[in-house]
Image: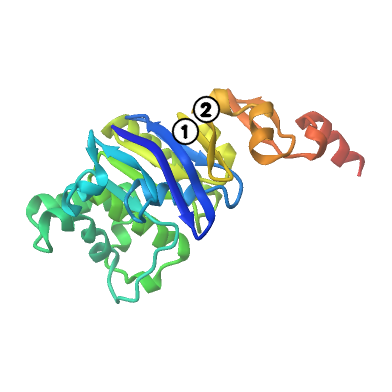
Amino acid sequence: MINIEKLSVNIGRKAILNNVSTHIKEGAITAIIGPNGAGKSTLLNAATRLIDSDSGTVYLDNENITEMKSDAVAKKLAVLKQSNHTNLKITVRELVSFGRFPYSKGRLSKADHALVDEALEYMALTDMQDRYLDELSGGQRQRAYISMTLAQDTDYIFLDEPLNNLDMKHSVQMMQLLRKLVREKQKTIVIVIHDINFASCYADHIIALKEGEVLLDGRKDDVITTEALKAVYDMDINIECIFGQQICVYFDDAKTVDEFIEEVQLV
């Protein structure tokens, strides 16, 4: 259980987060959405203790996260920042093995190697586990870093823009994987994401930020509405039900899909 209570982060005189409170739903995917500068990444970083907050408290399984030892946090919560890079000449397997460090301190056991194998398989990286990171494409490296968080084998996984550098096919596969982790391993996953259609199709719960404050916080079907999203993004977004999913259509003047197709054909 993760509870965030009255969390504020300031840079100079500017409030990046202002009195944010929310509860992360267990065994579900929570998507954090909002326009650029809304405070999405800051919320993820402050909630996971990557940065200090100016006020407020984050409770991880009823413990104040700032009072917990680093190893104790790392055994419960894995986090992947938006920008990840290393100058080390290491292989994919070596990177993924870092996820076991809170347990192994670098001396991997049989059980640790088994979890690394499982993480590599989940991310379809087994065949390239001996390749060096600098030999991979951006999308492959992103999958390797996410595989490292899976090897950490925590109850909670926080991902900041996990679809960065992924093409459409691998973005869909990534979101399907996250759903599989929730369904099969009862993971609790929090993602910062820009594409609200991926949030709509794959998340269970959505937190919408605007100007450092929580504007919406609820079930995805309650958040993915024209009225709610206009309050977040200051634009008209038409919602179409396609194959049972609420899809956001960004066409001008909130045209329906049929109206847009007709307009394009006329042009």
- Seen at 37% across and 36% down, the residue is 5
Q: Is residue 170 above or below residue 144?
A: above
Q: Is residue 266 left or right of residue 47?
A: right
Q: Residue furthest right?
A: 266
Q: Pointer 2: residues within 10 angstroms few (<14), some, or many (20+)?
A: many
Locate the N terminus by quadrant.
top left
**Considering only order in the chain, which callout, 1 or 2, is on the residue closer to the N terminus?**
1
On the image, numbered disc 1 is attached to which residue? 203
Locate the C terminus by quadrant.
top right
- Seen at 82% across and 35% down, the residue is 253
For this rendering, which residue is in front, 65 or 31? 65
Q: Position of residue 34 (x, y in %)?
A: 58, 43
Q: Secondary structure at mark 1?
A: loop
- Seen at 58% across and 23% down, the residue is 244
- Seen at 12% across and 53% down, the residue is 103
Quarter residue 126 falls in: bottom left
On the image, numbered disc 2 is attached to which residue? 220
Q: Is residue 238 above or below residue 250?
A: above
Q: Position of residue 7 (x, y in %)?
A: 41, 42
Q: Position of residue 76 (x, y in %)?
A: 22, 43
Q: Is residue 210 left or right of residue 94?
A: right
Residue 67 in view (yes/no): yes
Name the amino acid type tagged 2: Lys
Which color scheme did the rendering employ for the protein? rainbow
For this rendering, which residue is in front, 216 or 157? 216
Residue 161 in view (yes/no): no
Mark 2 to mark 1: distance in Å? 7 Å
Q: Of the numbered discs in the image, which one, if any, rests on residue 195? A: none
Q: Pointer 1: residues within 10 angstroms few (<14), some, or many (20+)?
A: many
Q: Position of residue 135 (x, y in %)?
A: 39, 72
- Tags 2 and 1 touching, CB below 8 Å: yes
Name the amino acid type tagged 1: Ala
